[in-house]
Amino acid sequence: MRSLYLASAAVLFCLGATAAHATPFAGSFSVATLDLTALDSSNNPTTNLSNATSFEFGTSLVTGGANGNFAPFVGDTITFSTLTLNNLTTFSFTSAFGTFQADSLTYTPSLVPLVTNGEQSSETIYEYGTFTPVAGSGLDPDSLSLTFALTDTDSGSGNSLSVSGTAAAPAAAPPASVPEPITLSLLGMGLVGLGAVRRRKANATA
């Protein structure tokens, strides 16, 4: 009987240890993309970021700075799907350590023109979805966010396009949206109008 109790306790201990080991995949990493092709609405390559409607990634790697459960995969390859700006929910990636699938349009892409040492434009794209670790890892799926910063620089030798990317699980909060210029103008006009009304009331009271 005692042997039966000991055997049962051992089984329960093993089951408990297995359940406790199943934890969400957590950590962050940076991405280096060796080649990025911007495509216009006709699916032709373009060097002008403002004409781009989608992006195709070349070989992409997990770079230094990876931590948490991603730390062992520095140098591993990631295969990104085409990043389509008008349908971010189709974006995904596959890798030796798991897969990612976007599941909601959390942040609308924004194109912010800059003028720094010539003509430069940049675009920040935020993706949100579910990361599923590779089978056998003992880790559970978790939310994951990807932020891509794309920059187009127009120099004397022509345009050059670059991208940097970071990922975090559980997902990081999306970047704060920047008000459009027309929104700022309307806000300014409203404040001016409010000030004029207050002055009129003050003059009427006097």
Image (tube, grey):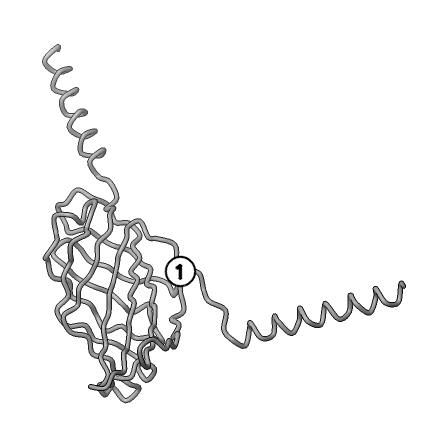
Please name the residue shown 19% across and 46% down the image: 69
The spot of residue 121 in percent (x, y) is 34, 77
Q: Is residue 159 left or right of residue 184?
A: left
> Where 155 falls versus 95 (above or below)?
below
Residue 22 position by quadrant: top left
Where's residue 140, x and y in %? 24, 45
Q: Nearer the viewer, residue 156 or 80?
A: 156
Query: Against 83, is 16 above or below?
Result: above
Q: Disc 1 designates what residue? A: 175
Say what secondary structure mark 1 lies in.
loop
Q: Residue 172: horizontal and vertical position, in percent?
A: 35, 53
Left or right position of 79 against 28: left
Amino acid type at circle 1 is Pro
Q: Residue furthest top?
A: 2
Asked whether 85 or 30 is in front, the reply is 30
The quarter of the picture where residue 52 lies is: bottom left
Question: Badge 1: how crowded within 10 Å, few (<14), some, or many (20+)?
Answer: few
Q: Position of residue 66 (x, y in %)?
A: 19, 51
Q: Quadrant of the C terminus?
A: bottom right
Which residue sits at x=38%, y=77%?
A: 113
| Residue 56 picture quarter | bottom left
Q: How many marks?
A: 1
**The N terminus: image quadrant:** top left
